[in-house]
Structure formats: C-alpha cells, structure tokens
Amino acid sequence: MKKILITGASGFIGSFLTEEALKRKYEVYAGVRSTSSRKYLSDTRIKFFETELSDKEVLKQKLRESEKFDCVIHNAGITKTCKKEEFDTVNFQYTKNLCDALAETNTPPEKFIYISSLDAYGPGNEKTMQPIKITDKPTPVTLYGKSKLKAENYIKKLQNFPHIIIRPTGVYGPREKDYYLAYKSIKNGLETYIGTKKQIVSFIYVKDLVRLIFDALESDISGKSYFVSDLRKYTTEEFNKIVKKELKVKTLQIVFPKKFVKILAYISGKISCILGKPATLNPEKFKIISAANWQCDSSDLVKDFSFKPEYDLEKGIKETISLYKKNNLL
Ligand SMILES: NC(=O)c1ccc[n+]([C@@H]2O[C@H](COP(=O)([O-])OP(=O)(O)OC[C@H]3O[C@@H](n4cnc5c(N)ncnc54)[C@H](OP(=O)(O)O)[C@@H]3O)[C@@H](O)[C@H]2O)c1
C-alpha cells in the first residue's frame, strides 16, 4: 500500500483528493493544522499528519518521526487574505519549506504534485481571444498568481525531485464556497455580470480534477506542467443559464460597468478586513473575475493521460446544486 500525504486536506479540493486516494487504496495521511476542520475527513481509514508548514525544522522533525511518504500532493494554499504578504508566505514560502524539509531529511517522494493555478499564467489575450497556452510567457496579474508562479519556479529547479505541476482553472462542485455565492444570488433572483455577458471562462468539476491528478501521479511522467479544464470554453451567460435552469428561477439581469465593480471590490475588501475576514469580492479577486479571457489549452491532458472529463458544466452544476439542496444550502 503506497503512503500518500495530502496537504490542505481539510479544504474543498483537498477533501475530494483524500476521497480519491482512499478509493485508489492508498494509505492516506491528511496534512492538516491543529485548527483545521475535519468535517470531511471522518473516514476512519484516514491518518493525520498534523503540522504547521511555517516551520521547516518542525516539519523535518515530523518527517523523521514518520515513515517515508511515497507520494505527496501539496494542495494547501490561500486564494484570499487581508494581509497581502501572506500570499507569498503561504503559497511560496510554505511550499519551499515542505520541499526543503523533504529533501533535507532525505525523504523526497517518488512523485510530488503541486497544485498551482491557471492564475500563475494570468488571463489570456483579450484581443486575439486565443486560449492560454503552455508555451505562453506567464504574466500573472494578481499577488496570488505571482506567489503560485514563484512556488512553481522553485520546485522546477530542485534536483532529484520528480514533480508535476497542476494548474486548475475555476474548480467547482459541492463544498465549494465562491461559485456558491453566485448560485445563491441567482436563487434570490439576481443575475449579475461585470462589463459583459460574454466573458470567456473555463471550468473543471472537482471529481474530474482529482481523478486527473491521480492519473498524473500514477503515470511515468514527471517535470511537466498542465492546465486543467474540462477541455471546453463557456461564457458567463451560459454558466448563469444552467444555474437558472437547475434552480428553476427567473432572474433580473444586471451588467455592471467594470469601473463600478472595481470600486465595490475596494469597499468590500476594506470593510471585510476591518471585520476580520477576507471577502470573496476584493481588489485582487476583481482582476480575476473581470478578465475577458480565461480559456486555456488543456490538450496535453488528452495526449499524456487520455483525459476524458466525465462532467461538462451542465452535468457538474446539476450534481452540485442537487447536493446543496439536499444539505438545505439552496
Ligand atoms: N478552487 C479553485 O477554483 C482553485 C483553482 C485553482 C487552484 N486552486 C488551488 O487549490 C488549492 C486548494 O484550494 P481550495 O479551493 O480547496 O481552497 P480551500 O477550500 O480554502 O482549502 C485550502 C486548504 O489549504 C489549507 N491552508 C490554508 N492556509 C494554510 C496555512 N497557512 N497552512 C497550512 N494549510 C493551509 C486549508 O487549511 P485550513 O482548513 O486549516 O484552513 C485548507 O485545507 C489551493 O492551493 C488553491 O490555490 C484552487
């Protein structure tokens, strides 16, 4: 039985990674903090690797005490924060700490998977509207994207450290909290847009994402990076249309001017941070949600892993909404 460490196991994607690992008969160690929720980690087969990633020496001690991990999926990360410097600390420095601790204790795994983000490349060209390609020069527009790219570059330079970098586009599914706000707004009869209804977006359903991650982990491939989407492109209008259909509601459509949303993001970011919790709408997030082109070229997934998504947006949203409804969340 192979031993796997999954960091950020308590979160949305991490909890699905943990389930997929159990399904594939790994000995699963959920990497969590003492404060992490274990709501989705109740399966008795799950073992816990409880540690902070902030202290490399503590990490090294913990690694020495445990048996070597055959594989590591480093998924812990932050996408929003009130302290800008935290993006670099958590997404870059903690990744470096984990890699260095594995190397310095002589326990590098057979494969290290880093969960980066499409944001590490930044949005696609708004004139040509071509998909973002792996051969493009990364130009992240947010501190989040920059911190993810910095971590990627660090991993790529390591010697004897077989790795794969996964850059998911927007991940949706049950347990997710940001798109959920859009479902709630539509449920309440309000369908909003920023500047246009035709913003090009891409998605990946969480179950397809975790399946793909394990296919990559179990492959002979290493040293490569992948954009992960369901191989399609959508408009924000299509997304909303599917949500409306599933919720069986009629809505009021409002296309807000970009400048207005930018100001709103500033105010919302400030107020929420005064209240001590980062808002979903903040100036950094505005740069992401207002970009016109988030289509990416994921064709390498087909070539290397014969990837065939089981979910398109319609099927994924249907399942997500039905589970939210079952849990009285919609
Ligand atoms: N969701 C998306 O659309 C998307 C797209 C592309 C990439 N990603 C990447 O996927 C990963 C998982 O994202 P998610 O959507 O599942 O987010 P999430 O639900 O917020 O989960 C984040 C996980 O990271 C852990 N974490 C956060 N700060 C940490 C810290 N300082 N030390 C240790 N662990 C920490 C959290 O632990 P606690 O429970 O203790 O807070 C949690 O388990 C992230 O790296 C993110 O950048 C997400």
Image (tube, rainbow, N blue to C red):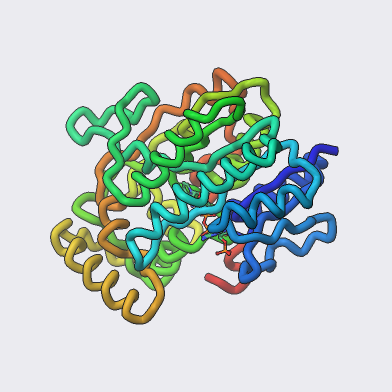
x, y percent for residue 309:
58, 34
Q: Quadrant of residue 20?
A: top right
Q: Which residue is at 32% across, 57% downward?
A: 285
x, y percent for residue 220:
67, 20
Does 165 appear above or below 46?
above
Instruction: Left or right? Give the position of 246 relative to 134.
Output: right
Q: Determine if residue 326 is in view.
A: no
Q: Which residue is at 66% across, 32% downward?
A: 111
Q: Which residue is at 59% across, 27% downward?
A: 307
Picture quarter with the N terminus: top right
Does 285 appear above or below 181?
above
Which residue lies most toward the top here?
Answer: 303
x, y percent for residue 164:
56, 31
Q: Nearer the viewer, residue 287 or 293?
A: 287
Does 179 appear above or below 311?
below
Q: Quadrant of residue 113?
A: top right
Q: How many marks?
A: 0
Q: Determine if residue 111 is in view.
A: yes
Q: Which residue is at 33% across, 75% downward?
A: 273
Q: Nearer the viewer, residue 264 or 202?
A: 264
Does 273 appear above or below 262?
below
x, y percent for residue 254:
23, 63
